[in-house]
Image (cartoon, rainbow, N blue to C red):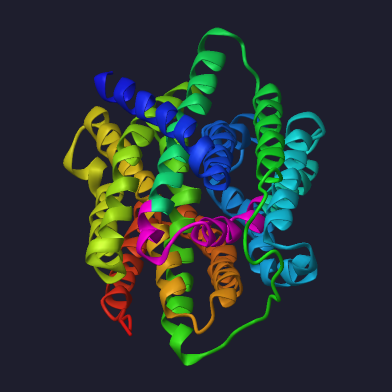
Amino acid sequence: MTVIKRKTSEWLTGILNGLQHDRDFTLFLFVGVFTGIAGGIYSTTFNNYLNDVFKLSADARGLVELPREFPGMTIMFVLALLSFMGDVKIAVTGMLLAAIGLFGLGTLSPSFTAALVWTMIFSLGTHIFFPLTPSIGMHLSGKEQYGVRLGRYNAYNIFAALIGYAVVWCGFKYLGLTYRIAFVIASVFYVIAAFVLGRMKSIAPKKFRLKFILRKRYTLYYTLSLVNGARKQIFLTFAPWVLIQVFHLTPPLFAMLGVFIAILSIMTRTIVGNAIDRLGERFVLSAEGILLVFICLGYAFAENIASAGIAVIILSACYIIDNSMNAVEMARSTYVRKIVHKPEDVTSVLAAGTSFDHIIAMTIPFLGGMLWVSYGYKAVFLCAACIGLINLFLSAKIRIDKT
């Protein structure tokens, strides 16, 4: 509790000082706060919503990712069509689409088909502003501060997610909160985030020409994006599904795990940001690869080495550690920023990386679901461990020209 109180005090003091001396970046931090609350609510309820309302099997859960991740694959083309608006306005549009999608998911989903349509709209919105967020943050930072400033944004984002987790925990446990109301509340926070982002006065470039850039110097980044998409999608889809279907965790319990994730992430996001600036992207991404292998093995063998009660603790710990590692995504963004020929190419390369990420992300859940049904969930995570080894090998090849 002492850590939370101290961090809360630092958080509020930083916001008040920032409004006076660094207005645009402070507004950017507020965007992180409001999207953090919305994301906290969504992330702790969506999988339980699918399980409780539609009673999906593991292979059917994998199929959900096809329409959910399709917008990510097409994001290059979507951003190209919207590029005349400028990066901030495009991000605002994405947040509003995310709000519409969640509102529809909560209030206008009488069937599974309808729920998939609203999920696609929500996914389109989040995938629109996902590659723009680090780009906007780095535009508001000096080169020597990329890691620290993005780390600060992400720390505010995950700290605010605590509020979302609290809403889910208190709401479902004591107040009779429903999935419908939870999604509507999250949609409101996305609308607020869009409004705050739209209040920024100065950011360069106002507009950009988005283009698909295929150069040898970006091959490693695009390959890392493909591998990361495969690894990430296994965890996003099947890590919570194991806890729900095998160990029967409820939304309040996921909210409690979310609190542990947030507390750990407040520290790790700052640590990762500093490590990027001091030790470099190769060190950070290689460390992630090593840790991922052990997490995958934990998922695969927890039931074999411990009782059911201890196994669920081990799996929960793996879930917490994996989710607290999302900060490592900053290293891929700053790596791109350091290797591009021109600063205005950053958004294009990041968007292309997102598209490559989602090409593989669309197929992995389907294959993983079939693997689960045929051989059990342990086989899924053994495959994920192999992907982690590939990620480690590629990360070790990162080189950045200092000139």
Q: What span is colored magenta in the figure?
A: 126-148
Most extreme residue toward the front is 21
Question: Residue at 69% across / 34% down in the picture?
Answer: 192
From the top left corner, tell me how far across and down residue 402 is, in percent: 30, 81
Question: Residue at 75% across / 42% down in the picture?
Answer: 101
- Residue 126 visible within the image: yes
| Quadrant of the rendered image containing residue 302 | top left
Q: How many marks?
A: 0
- Residue 248 visible within the image: no
Most extreme residue toward the top is 174
From the top left corner, tell me how far across and down residue 231 is, in percent: 42, 62
Position of the C terminus by quadrant: bottom left
Relative to 119, is 365 above or below?
A: below
Relative to 250, is 27 above or below?
A: below
Pick the residue in front: 53 or 179.
Answer: 179
Asked if residue 257 lies left or right of residue 371, the reply is: left
Q: Is residue 128 magenta?
A: yes
Relative to 251, is 273 above or below?
A: below
Question: Residue at 33% across / 54% down in the picture?
Answer: 273
Q: Is residue 282 magenta?
A: no
Position of the N terminus by quadrant: top left
From the top left corner, tell me how far across and down residue 272 is, in percent: 30, 53
